[in-house]
Amino acid sequence: MAHDFLTNSKIIAAYKEKTPLSAECAKEAKEHFPSGLTHDSRHLRPYGLYVDKAKGSRKWDVDGNEYVDFFGGHGALLLGHNHPVVTAAVHEQIDKGTHYGAGHRLEIKWGSLVKDLIACAEEVRFLSSGTEANLMALRLARAHTGREKLLRFKGHYHGWQDHVAFGVSNHFDGSPTPGVLNGIAENVVMAPPDDIDETKRIIESHDDIAAVIIEPTGSAFGKTPVTGKFLSGLREITKKLGIVLIFDEVVSGFRAAPGGAQQVHNVIPDLTSLAKIVAGGLPGGAICGSTELLDQLDFDVAEAKGFEKIGHQGTFNANPLSASAGVAMLQKVRDESPTQDAIDTARSIRSKVNKVFVEEDIRWACYGQFSELHFFTNPENLALDPENFEFMKRKCDFFKSDQEVTTKFRLALMVNGIDINGKLAGKVSAVHSEADADRTADAVRGAIDMMRSEGALRH
Ligand SMILES: Cc1ncc(COP(=O)(O)O)c(C=O)c1O
């Protein structure tokens, strides 16, 4: 059986013993939801945590256990949970109404903050999620170029809509996943990440590419990083051939730098998709970019220039609650240093964790460039120096993972009071502290002990 490792495991027994009320919730949820879940990323065997409350860098499950939280609202919580400034802004707004069916001053402020921070943003349109932002980016690109195809990179995630629902964790040959039309998949071209010569060759062998979309830090916020040189190469070829370059900065926006990965690498795309941090931890997204592209949504420009405007609705676009949180968040990003604070703390956590790996004599690494933690469990037992681990140079296979090691390490971390995501990755916020870093290192040591004592470390 594929999940035999779930039986006779002390780690799983310890997790179950610690989380009986989460187990009950999971059982009840299965009566309502497929797999009992409302988001695939929360899938975990034997079951995931049910959380009751959160504050700062911590959250508490329904059994009252405390965790240092690195799930971070799927990356949205740059200021941690319930930051008092964001909470106050939302409280103030909720008393004034949650939806006006009309424009409001907060959306104007929100849009101007996006423009202050994101270099490519000459104009902005708010939507409700990152998936929607990328869908709109693609439509803008197709309408602008009159071409049909989208070029994407293997392993890069851009939401769950049809054009991007394959080639992320499976179907790398570009074939459609269930429910996706062949006709859509045929209009998507897959390229290898961080290989500019091959990407250029693929682009040049098509004459109908409307857009290239990329996570500009590499997939999953740098799990498989891309280089600035690769991004410049992409900028050059797309400009030359009139292809719209889209940076999906849904995660990296305001996190890699206040101005996103485009600021870090000084490579400015035509369009940028935003979500998560942009809406301050509430639902929301934005597409921003050149006036020429965004003007395709403009009634007056379309009339004056005689083209058919692109339609765009969305009940919750720029809703006042998300706008209030987004404004509070982006003002802090612009005027203070939460982005850098989170990056600094993440570096310290990685360093402390790597020291544990060295002391425990296991060839694992905790790596990352910005405010992220990526745990590499080294399925092939390659020799490595965890402090100077360069994933792409190692030519590691990102998609190779050992389900038993991944599941048990994650559960063992939970038993030791740390929550990371199913890719063994975490996002660090501006309010994570050195105490959180120490606690994380201790938890990693505790988790390794548990793994070792039941023979779950492969090497
Ligand atoms: C890089 C990237 N793009 C797009 C999305 C989709 O955003 P949403 O979940 O808001 O639809 C995500 C979500 O995790 C993401 O990480």
Image (tube, rainbow, N blue to C red):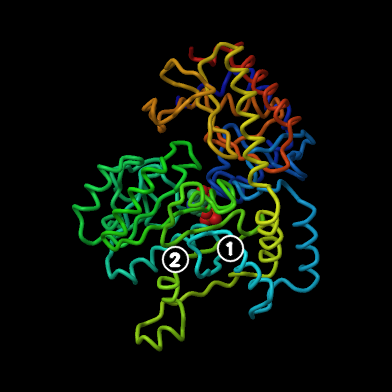
How many other residues sit within 10 Å of disc 1, few (<14), some (14-19) or many (≥20)?
many
130 in relation to 34, above or below: below
Q: What element does badge 1 sit on?
A: helix
Residue sitting at 56 percent across and 24 percent down?
6
The image's mark for residue 136 is 2
Q: Residue furthest left?
A: 205
Q: Is mark 1 within 8 Å of ligand 1?
A: no
The span from disc 2 to disc 1 (Cα, nearest Å) is: 17 Å
Name the residue type under label 2: Met
Q: Is mark 2 within 8 Å of ligand 1?
A: no
Numbered label attached to residue 322? none
| Residue 90 at x, y percent in the picture | 76, 62
Locate the N terminus and report the quarter of the image it occupies: top left
Q: Give whichever of discs 2 and 1 has the lower sequence position.
A: 1
Q: Nearer the viewer, mark 2 or mark 1?
A: 1
Q: Is residue 281 left or right of residue 132?
A: right
Q: Quadrant of residue 361?
A: top right
Image point 35% across, 53% down: which residue? 235
**Residue 114 numbered tag:** 1
> Which residue is nearer to you in this view: 345 or 177?
345
Q: Secondary structure at mark 2?
A: helix
Q: Which quarter of the picture shows residue 116?
A: bottom right
Residue 407 in the image: state x and y as whole percent: 55, 28
Question: In this image, 219 relative to 52: left or right?
Answer: left
Residue 124, given in percent of the width and then of the height, sits at 53, 69
